[in-house]
Image (spheres, rainbow, N blue to C red):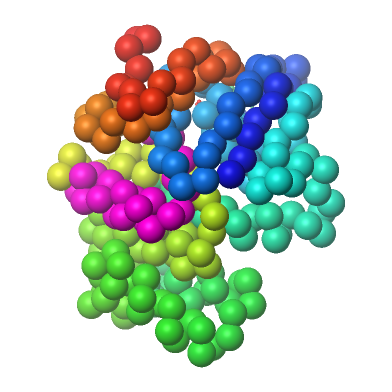
């Protein structure tokens, strides 16, 4: 799916946020990225969606070195990646239906496709009955489910979730994780940054731990980090 080879990111102020990282994520896998604040997790995500470029190293995504993409090619790359954030980032003046439809319009889907796909993803996240509500009329867990529906509607190859349960209570978090598991079961690669120890310990998935911009642990069926 994608591979980092000796990737280093030095920001303009000379700070090295990611330091000589190499790892490979297989198609269809589910992996957690853990590490304290400042470890380099967000930078890693930004590198993947080409919001920042590495200072050194290569990032191969679907057999293509994305560090070499031209400006013109970036939108096409980003369509292959769906990102979900801790704070949902829904458009508050659009209804649930319109939020998802808008994501499809942005990449040029036909109205017919949109009318077919929006109800399908709403049903997948169990919120068909909220199509005409506005985001602020929904609970946090429901808003996150809408954000997930929006991220998957364009059928990305990779889903990146940046602390998706950070604002949710344990029970709601568990429901959200069931949706991610189902998305993964249907074949989409999932990469999740999290501080949620209970979730990582329960899921028994690959855990990559970052510290000071380096990978200090990479275990299959791992537990949450213990480097406190
Ligand atoms: P995390 O997501 O694990 O908290 P980040 O990738 O956000 O880590 O940050 C890693 C380090 O890089 C931090 O020390 C942060 O202060 C620094 N950093 C992040 N973005 C920038 C930037 N644009 N310019 C300079 N330093 C940055």
The structure residue drawn at horizontal position 46% and vertical position 53%, both measured from the top left corner, is: 188
Q: Residue at x 68, y 17 (%)?
A: 20
Please identify the quarter of the rendering in which residue 15 is found. top right
Q: Residue at x 70, y 36 (%)?
A: 59
Q: Quadrant of residue 195?
A: top left
Q: In the shown orientation, is residue 152 left or right of residue 140?
A: right
Judge by depth and name the residue closer to the eye, 97 or 119.
119
Where residue 9 appears, as percent x and y from the top left, is: 71, 25
Residue 17 placement: quadrant? top right
User: Which region is colored magenta?
Assistant: 172-194
* Rendered-image quadrant of the N terminus: top right
Residue 134: in sight, yes or no?
no
Left or right: residue 139 compared with residue 121: left
Residue 155 in picture, x, y percent from top left: 51, 64
Q: Is residue 141 left or right of residue 31?
A: left
Q: Nearer the viewer, residue 5 or 160?
A: 5
Quadrant in which the C terminus appears: top left
The residue that appears at 64% across and 55% down in the rendered structure is: 78
Q: Answer whether residue 192 is magenta in the image.
A: yes
Tell me: residue 105, above or below residue 88. below
Q: Quadrant of ligand 1?
A: top right
Give yes or no for residue 202 being in the magenta stretch. Answer: no
Answer whether residue 19 is visible to the viewer in this image.
Answer: yes
- Residue 75 percent location from the top left of the image: 70, 59
Outermost residue on the bottom side: it is 112
């Amino acid at each position: 799916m994608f591979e980092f080879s000796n990737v280093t990111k030095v920001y303009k102020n000379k700070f090295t946020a990611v330091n000589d990282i190499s790892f490979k994520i297989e198609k269809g896998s589910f992996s957690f990225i853990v590490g304290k604040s400042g470890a380099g997790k967000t930078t890693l995500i930004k590198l993947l969606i080409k919001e920042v470029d590495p200072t050194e190293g290569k990032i191969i995504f679907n057999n293509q070195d994305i560090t070499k993409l031209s400006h013109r090619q970036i939108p096409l790359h980003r369509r292959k990646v769906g990102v979900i954030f801790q704070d949902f980032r829904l458009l508050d003046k659009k209804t649930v239906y319109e939020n998802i439809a808008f994501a499809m319009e942005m990449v040029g889907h036909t109205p017919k496709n949109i009318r077919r796909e929006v109800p399908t993803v709403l049903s997948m996240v169990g919120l068909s009955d909220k199509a005409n509500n506005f985001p602020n009329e929904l609970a946090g867990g429901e808003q996150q489910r809408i954000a997930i529906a929006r991220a998957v509607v364009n059928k990305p190859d990779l889903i990146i979730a940046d602390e998706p349960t950070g604002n949710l209570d344990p029970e709601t978090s568990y429901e959200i994780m069931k949706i991610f598991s189902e998305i993964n079961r249907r074949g989409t690669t999932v990469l999740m940054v999290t501080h949620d120890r209970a979730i990582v310990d329960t899921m028994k998935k690959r855990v990559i731990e970052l510290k000071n911009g380096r990978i200090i642990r990479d275990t299959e069926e791992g537990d949450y980090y213990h480097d406190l």
